[in-house]
Image: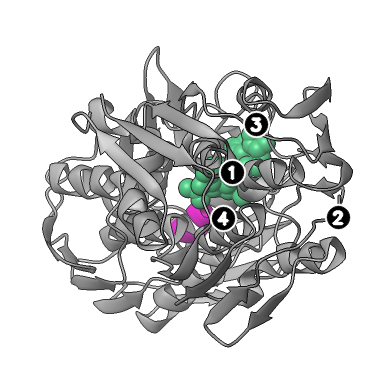
Amino acid sequence: MSKFIIQGPAKLSGEIEVRGAKNAALKIIPAAILSREKITINNLPDIEDVNRALELMEDLGAEVSRQNGRCEIQVSELSKNELNPGLANKFRASIMFAAPLLARAGEVKFPHPGGCVLGAATRPIDLFLEGFEAMGAEIKEKEDYYHIKAKKLKGCEYFFTTVTVTGTEAMIMAAVLAEGDTVLKNCAMEPEIPALAEYLNRQGARVIGAGTPTIKIEGVKEIKAGQFNIIPDRIETGTFAILAAATKSEIKITNCEPKHIESLLNIFKKQGVKFETGDDWLKISAAKSIKPYNIKTREYPGFPTDLQSPYTVLATQANGSSLVHETIYERRLLFTDMLAQMGADIIMCDPHRVVINGPTKLYGRKLTSPDLRAGITMIIAALIAEGQTEIDNIYQIDRGYEDIDGRLRKLGADIRREGTLL
Ligand code: EPU
C-alpha cells in the first residue's frame, strides 16, 4: 500500500496542465467495441481507471497499443462476451462495457460494477437494465452476475426517471447499431456526452441532440475507424482552481475548458476569488479573503457533485458559514469527518447537508482516502494544514489523477509518495 506524506501549509505558484477527462476516456475505450476498425485516442490520461479499462479490453480480445497520451485499440474479433469479474469489480465505469458488448455480440455477462461506493448501498444500475429491456433485451439477474441477451437491439422511446450520465451514454452506445430510431428523454447533459456523440457521428453514427435533454439516435449498420481527442478534465480544472483559492495561491491552469466549470467560476465571483480566463486557460489570483457561499450539487450545468468535496474544504477557509447540500449521492459527505479531525468546524445537519463555519486552522493528521474525490480533497486540506499529513489508500486518488504528486511538486508542494502502488 502506498501513501502520500504532505507537509503544510503551502503557498503554491506556477502552471499546471489539465489532463484528458477520466469520464470521457472511460466511455470512448469501450466504444471501440462498436467497430471492427482501429480507433486512435489522443490525450488519454495515465490513471488507474484507464489502465483497468484497457486491461478489460485486452481480456475481451482487443489489440491495444499505448504510448504517452496516445492509444490505439482495435477489436477485429471479440474473444468473449463476459467481463472479467476481477477487473470489472475494480471500477464503476466497467458498466460502460455492457452496451457495446450487447450491441456487437448480442449477449453480455457482467458482475455488478465496482468503484466508489457512493449510493445508498451500492450504486444502482436499474436504469441501464430497464433501458436495455426497452430495446428488446432479455435480462437475467443471477446471484453474482447479470446475463443480458438481444440478438438485435431495437430502437425505442425511453424516459430516464433519474438523470444519469453513464446511463445516457450507455443507451447512446446501445442505440447506434440498433434497428430503427431511439429517442431518449430526460438525458444528462455533461460535456462528456456530446463529446462521445460527436466521435460516434464522425465514424458513421447518427446521434442528434447530445448535450440537450432529448437525444435521438438513428440506428446505422456500422461504425468506422476514427480518432478521438479527449476533452480536458473539467473536474481536474475545478479541483486545481479550488486548490489555488484554498491555499491563497496564484496558479495558472492550462489546457482546460473554463466554460465547462462556469458554475464554480460564478461562485468564485460571489466569494471574491479573482480569476482571469482565456479559451484554454484559467488563472486564479491569490485570494485575500474568501466569502462564504451555499452550494447545492446538480446535474450539468449545475454545480458538479465531483467538486463538492474540494469545495467543502475551501469553505473551511471562508469568513463565515457555508451550507453544502449534496443532492446526487447518499454517502458523499462522510469524508467531512476527516476534515473535522483536522480542525474544521463542520456540522452534519442530515446525510445530505453540512454547515461549515470558517475560517478555521487545519492541522496535519493521519488519514485514509475513502474514494477518489474525497482523496484529492484530503490533499488540498493537507496543503492548507499546519504540520504533516499522511494519506493512505492513495490507489483511490491514482484512479483519477495522473501523477498528482509530481504535478503538485512543480507548483511547490511538499508531497512525497511512500510504499508500493497496490
Ligand atoms: N442512478 C440510479 N440508477 C441507475 C444509474 C444511476 O438510480 O441505473 C442514480 C445514482 O445512484 C445517482 C444518480 O442516478 O444518485 C446520478 O448518478 P449518475 O448515473 O449520473 O452517475 P454515474 O453516471 O454513475 C458519472 C460519473 C461520476 C459523477 C456522476 C455525476 C462516470 C464514469 N462517472 O457517474 O463520476 O459523479 O456521473 O456527475 O462518468 C467521479 O468521477 O468521481 C465520479 C463519481
Select label 3 or label 1 by which is in front: 1
Give the residues in magenta.
167-173
- Few, some or many residues within 10 Å of mark 2 (<14, 14–19, 20+): many
Above-or-below relation of 70 to 136: below
Label 4 and label 1: CA atoms lie apart by 14 Å
Q: Label 1 belongs to which residue?
A: 384
Q: Is residue 95 left or right of residue 161?
A: left
Q: In which quarter of the view is residue 265 placed? A: bottom right
- The answer to which of marks 4 and 1 sits earlier in the sequence is 4
Q: Main secondary structure of the magenta part?
A: helix
Q: CA distance from mark 3 to mark 4?
A: 16 Å
Judging by the rendered image, the residue that carries numbered circle 4 is 239
Mark 2 or 4, closer to the camera: 2
Percent coordinates x, y for residue 184 in the rendering: 65, 59
Q: Which one is closest to the eye, mark 4 or mark 1?
A: 1
Frontmost of labels 3 and 4 is 4
First reached walking from the N terminus: tag 2 or tag 1: 2
- Residue 169 colored magenta? yes
Q: Which residue is mark 2?
A: 291
Type of amino acid at the residue the image marks with label 1: Ile
Split into 4 quadrants, where in the image is the C terminus? top left
Residue nearest the viewer, comparing 353 with 158 = 353
Between discs 2 and 4, the one toward the N terminus: 4
The circle drawn on residue 332 is 3
